[in-house]
Image (spheres, grey):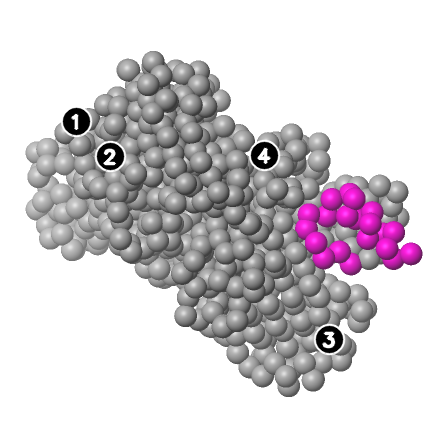
Amino acid sequence: MALDNQPKREFKVVGTRPPRPDGVDKVTGRAQYGADVSAPGMLVAKILRSPHAHAEILSIDTSAAEALPGVKAVVTWRDFGPVGDTIIDIGEDSSPLADIRDNCLARGKVLYDGHAVAAVAAVSAEVAKAALKLIKVEYRVLPYVTDVDAAMKPGAPVVLSGRVEETVQRGMSENVTHYCEFGHGDLESGFEAADVVVERSFTTAATHQGYIEPHACLASMTADGKADLWCCTQGQYNVRSVCAEILGMEASQLRVTASEIGGGFGGKTSIFIEPVALALSRKAGRPVKLVMTRDEVFKATGPTVSTSMDVKIGMTKDGRITAASSHLRYSGGAFPNATVDMGAQAAFAAYDLKAVRTFGWNALTNRPKESAYRAPGAPQAIYAVESVIDELCQKLNLDPLEVRLKNAAKKGTRSSYGPTFDDIGLIATLEAAKAHPHLKAPLGPNQGRGISAGFWFNFGGNTCVTLNINTDGTVSVTEGNPDIGGSRASIGMMAAEELGVPFEKVRTIVADTASLGHNDITDGSRVTFAVGLATIKAARDAIQKMCRRAAAIWGIDEEAVEWVDGAARPSGPNAGQFPPLTLAEIAAVSFQTGGPIAGHHEFNADGAGVSFGVHIADVEVDPDTGATKVLRYTVFQDAGKAVHPDYVEGQMQGGAVQGIGWALNEEYIYGADGRLQNAGFLDYRIPVASDLPMIDAVILEIPNPGHPYGVRGVGETGIVPPLAALSNAVSRAAGVRLNRLPMSPPRVLEAILSKG
């Protein structure tokens, strides 16, 4: 659905800042999160997890646990059925269903520290914990590998056999399961044309999404095979599909309701515990509640990929990039994934290049299965690319922002990953950054300023919306995507805008899987775009029906009625002299004019429109300790059209904060035994308010041609530039280039001392 063909649409609701519709429930504690749901006769579940990084399961003896008073069910992999070769979408990736099943409960061998082996449902948490201690598992410990470069070497311990795709070059370790390549042009000629060529290597650690709410669910399966599941998820329809397949159920027999969600950031697009809770409930004949501990969340749910990367870029003396290449090695943990595809496509997407090539490999390691973390794969690749561009600017004494402007992608640019860009906002964001006072502010001793551009694709996807016109003139919108970033507000605002009614007259609810057609996961920055677009079409469907009702009341042709400012009106003097009929007036007599009025729309949305952002970061580095203090931070991002600017700014600021943590502190640390050493917020340090400056958010609005209001997704681009912006700032402040994340004080100090 294209941008509305109007010279300059004047919005009345869209672009305003009404109070958030879920605010009162959340601040008063009335909102129901995953762990808040309970049921009569409910049992408590606990999971037994592997103490080894890699081991064969020789036997599992659950008899003693099953005999313990108060234990009602024990399950292992044997309680899950066959799933064949089914491939299922998981957020921004896809996965064999067998991998999801075997990640929920290990089959044959455990693949990482914390891999689930068995589960117990009992009358209390104390009894369940006691039962776990009675389960006897005999292991044969196997060699392990947790580093991506080590995993790729021939002779490395093999995590899973038989998973190598045909595209992978021969001679590599069997852990290398996936290969991709993107680009165009003549690299050799491009590098020869450069005045300076810089080639550098980089590494980034795996980081966790850091959501405060742990994974939680309540499962209830009755003797007739029907089941209900309540869980904190970013996609209840995906949960239904996966669980039904694993449990051997028909999808219609499982109803999944999404709770409020206490943070997800992509980490709750994956499924870890829900099939286990359902299997326990089926076996026990009672509802079963399963809530992860924080230790379990870190050890057994997906962090980001860890990476090792090489980037080579050539540049002329006046700042023109002549050629660029990158080699990306990503590890997504113990199961295959293709996140490196998105990193490889995003790496150089911000630039108009004649010669560019990116090569990517995914390797298995003995770590938990990777999950999305906002723009999965993009922050790491762009960190490496933007770091090399900044070093080139220093070597050639060029302004880093002007260099980015000189090489920026624009409408008509053939992207580094193939498509030709339509209207995009990169140059506008760079120009806004250039004009901002931040760029001109003076810096003091041991201080540095870093700049980075960033990119994300944005997705559309399968979407279904129903809009009901109530007889009192209010509007009910039913959509199927959990609200993780303000979507109930933005969807309600677009409905109000289209119908011409106040926002307060619209209520948006998130449906369970039995109440509405399929909706893809809340991911890929898709919801405000795709669900908003479906809502607009559903509203227009309802408007058409209300105009038909008005025409019948007036006795004129339907084509002679138009909808203006929330009311049906004759479209011209020839249609007759009738006073407008408002939405409320039409709704009030709807039962006498044909029955209830509703609009509906379902489709597979495309045209999401890519997103660009630019970040500026100022830091100060203590030369004696290596500690970094972030002094100032400004985010510039193209939102297409900011439906609710408060939420848009919050997404931009939130991405920056998470990127700051990723760049400076956060990492998974594995010991010599292959076990995670920092599975908790005490040792895995995320930023707190005292670590941060105020984040200044500057919204740009370059309309997306694929949406009637010009909307683009904004949820993921904000996390892409911070890694490079911070690295460039710290490198300039410390006087030495850093190439490993996070830039913890010991690493920064080591770099300072190494320069002599």
Q: Which residue is mark 2?
A: 255
Q: In the visual, does 395 lie left or right of 161?
A: right
Disc 4 to disc 2, C-alpha distance:
33 Å
Disc 3 to disc 2, C-alpha distance:
58 Å
* Structural crowding at the residue carrying mark 1, measured as other residues with C-alpha within 10 Å and reported as few (<14), some (14–19) or many (≥20): few
Which stretch is magenta?
Answer: 737-756
Q: Residue 495 location in percent, x, y? A: 33, 42
**Disc 1 vs disc 3: which is toward the camera?**
1
Dot 2 amino acid type: Arg
Q: Which residue is mark 1?
A: 223
Disc 3 to disc 4, C-alpha distance:
41 Å
Disc 1 to disc 3, C-alpha distance:
69 Å
Earlier along the polypeptide chain: callout 4 or callout 2? 2
Q: Residue 406 location in percent, x, y? A: 66, 71
Dot 3 amino acid type: Val
Callout 3–callout 4 Cβ contact below 8 Å: no
Seen from the viewer's position, the closer of residues 294 and 188 is 294
